[in-house]
Image (tube, helix red, strand yellow):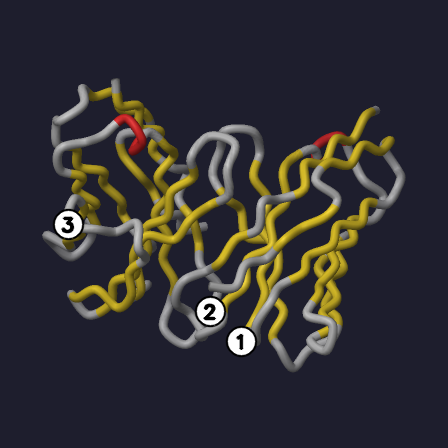
Amino acid sequence: EPEVTQTPSHQVTQMGQEVILRCVPISNHLYFYWYRQILGQKVEFLVSFYNNEISEKSEIFDDQFSVERPDGSNFTLKIRSTKLEDSAMYFCASRVDGEQTQYFGPGTRLLVL
Amino acid sequence: SQQGEEDPQALSIQEGENATMNCSYKTSINNLQWYRQNSGRGLVHLILIRSNEREKHSGRLRVTLDTSKKSSSLLITASRAADTASYFCATDPNSGYALNFGKGTSLLVTP
């Protein structure tokens, strides 16, 4: 069964560094999402992406963040100048056109020191 | 923004018993989805119920939706130790855009 995949599974970085989190959505899906979950807290929406542009973004998704679909399979989340509070699990999700179910990847656990 | 809120926050039952988790939300929705998360892992989609549906079944799962009360329930029948996980409801107000997750119910099923 097709799955959303994410790399790396874990990333440790120094405060102020840039990180790129990668996702490969399910191949026939057209809508892509990033969410994050700070340890012990609820899952929070960051951004949705369709047709090579952002569809919707939350207040969390400020100028520090950017998303890109650099090729036909990858979907990336870039965090510039990471802060301690960016430490969280980051989930990518995707869905097919015409359906509302979002399928989540296993997540990337980001730790900012 | 609206949010799903689950209760109870934690639930401990024995194998074979049924587990019921509730979710309340604040504004109108297009659909409501339930997800499971094993400790430190990804979110697994369980079931989606549309706003015009009242009940849905999938295997041992039964979901109800009461839009007049803005609430949903997830029933897991004949629970197993493998059902131990956190369960989240997520509301979808705009048909496929941002999901609003609740804080989740932590379910522990003991053998």
Could you say where residue A45 lies in the image, as x and y percent from the top left? Answer: 38, 53
Residue designated by label 1: B30
Could you say where residue B69 lies in the image, as x and y percent from the top left? Answer: 74, 72
- Report, in whole angstroms, how far the alpha carbon at label 2 lies from the one at label 3: 28 Å
Q: Which quarter of the rendering shows the C terminus of chain B?
A: top right
In the visual, does B75 lie left or right of A26? right
Task: Name the residue type under label 3.
Answer: Asp
- Report, in whole angstroms, how far the alpha carbon at label 2 lies from the one at label 1: 9 Å
Question: Element type at marker 1?
Answer: loop
**Residue at (13% x, 37% y) in the render:** A80
Point out the tag, 2 or 3, that comes first from the N-terminus: 3
The residue mark sitting in front, 2 or 1, is 1
**Residue at (55% x, 74% y) in the render:** B29
Task: Name the residue type under label 1.
Answer: Asn
Could you say where residue B80 lies in the image, as x and y percent from the top left? Answer: 78, 35
Residue designated by label 2: A100
